[in-house]
């Protein structure tokens, strides 16, 4: 687990800084520094001391040793907790389905559209962090490929939010779901003039900067059939980086990509809690779904990292 620290206020303080420190030996962390200045060696010394002492309370940047940082130029720090260390819980497909059912039960009162909205927003914010907007270039062009289930619904929600964030968004929705929830999500995209097509664009390279894989979720089983078999084949041979929602399409949720038939995404955005397949995922790994109540956390013994500030996602590795 990790503790977060706030930034030291004031014109001489450290701006835009977030530090996550492992509270136990099980939690590992990686520190990256941008805009390196003389303050870097002081921060790294402070960080090593904190890790060595295995702090169980937050290290605040207005503490006496940290105030020395105010004498140096601003720097930006980011932390990622390594989920492979064993400090994070993984939930099976069976437990993931049970968690969703309990969330939408009479005691907790969530609705499917509410959970989909929260999940899709998490996907959008994590994608935006990994592929940020730049004032010096055109907005990233995002193709969102949606399946017929809840994973596809998350992708439709993410498409709307990414559009509002300023991205250029296109949607591929080969098998629309004939339910009012999904139909309304498509209406919302139409109202924003976001193109929605049933066909995968013939050329991805040159037309898109990132593909969001929202095809299959944790409940998918069996053989991938047309048109998604052809879509996965096209995405696998494309050089455009892929971001997968919750589980890379074509993977077994518990066994991973043992068959080699699944996608090889650059980024994985787990939802609620990572699934066992994520243990073998080598790329950038985010967690979204900042809505898990204590009743769910305690029943399933979930160990999840804290979300920084008001963020809807946290980077795991």
Image (spheres, grey):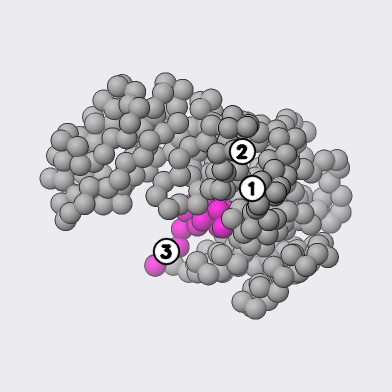
Residue 94: horizontal and vertical position, in percent? 75, 35
Q: Is residue 239 visible?
A: no
Residue farthest front in this picture = 107
User: Is 149 a magenta residue?
Assistant: no
Rounded to the nearest angstrom, the CA distance separating label 1 from label 2 is 9 Å
Residue 313: horizontal and vertical position, in percent? 50, 48
Say which residue appears at 19% left-offset and 49% top-offset: 13
Quarter of the image for the N terminus: give it.
Answer: top left
Q: Are marks 3 and 2 in contact (CB under 8 Å)?
A: no
Q: Which residue is mark 1?
A: 108
Measured along the vertical axis of the image, is residue 171 above or below residue 38? below
Q: Which residue is mark 3?
A: 134
23 and 292: which is toward the camera: 292
Rounded to the nearest angstrom, the CA distance separating label 3 from label 1 is 40 Å
Secondary element at tag 1: loop
Q: Is residue 207 left or right of residue 251?
A: left
Front disc: 1 or 2: 1
Say which residue appears at 12% left-offset and 45% top-offset: 71
Residue 134: horizontal and vertical position, in percent? 42, 63
Q: Of helix, strand and loop, which mostly describes the magenta segment?
A: helix
Q: Are marks 1 and 2 in contact (CB under 8 Å)?
A: yes
Q: Give the residues in magenta.
A: 120-136
Label 2: how many residues lie within 10 Å, few (<14), some (14-19) or many (20+)? some
Q: Is residue 63 left or right of residue 188?
A: left
């Amino acid at each position: 687990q990790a503790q977060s620290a706030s930034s030291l206020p004031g014109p001489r303080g450290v701006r835009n800084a977030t530090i996550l420190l492992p509270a136990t030996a099980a939690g590992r962390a990686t520190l990256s520094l941008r805009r390196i200045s003389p303050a870097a060696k002081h921060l790294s010394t402070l960080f090593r001391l904190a890790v060595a002492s295995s702090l169980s309370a937050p290290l605040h940047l207005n503490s006496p040793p940290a105030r020395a940082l105010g004498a140096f130029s601003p720097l930006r720090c980011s932390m990622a907790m390594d989920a492979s260390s064993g400090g994070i819980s993984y939930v099976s497909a069976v437990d993931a389905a049970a968690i969703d059912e309990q969330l939408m039960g009479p005691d907790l009162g969530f609705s499917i559209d509410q959970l989909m909205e929260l999940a899709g927003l998490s996907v959008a914010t994590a994608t935006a962090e990994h592929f940020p907007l730049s004032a010096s270039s055109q907005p990233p062009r995002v193709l969102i490929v949606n399946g017929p289930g809840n994973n596809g619904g998350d992708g439709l929600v993410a498409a709307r939010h990414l559009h509002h964030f300023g991205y250029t968004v296109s949607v591929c929705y080969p098998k629309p779901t004939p339910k009012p929830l999904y139909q309304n999500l498509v209406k919302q995209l139409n109202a924003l003039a976001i193109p929605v097509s049933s066909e995968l664009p013939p050329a991805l390279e040159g037309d898109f900067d990132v593909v969001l894989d929202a095809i299959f979720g944790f409940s998918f089983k069996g053989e991938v059939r047309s048109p998604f078999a052809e879509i996965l084949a096209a995405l696998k041979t494309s050089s455009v980086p892929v971001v997968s929602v919750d589980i890379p399409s074509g993977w077994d949720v518990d066994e991973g990509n043992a068959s080699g038939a699944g996608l090889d995404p650059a980024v994985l955005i787990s939802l609620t809690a990572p699934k066992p397949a994520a243990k073998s995922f080598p790329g950038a790994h985010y967690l979204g779904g900042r809505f898990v109540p204590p009743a769910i956390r305690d029943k399933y013994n979930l160990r999840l990292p804290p979300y920084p500030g008001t963020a809807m996602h946290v980077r795991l590795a």
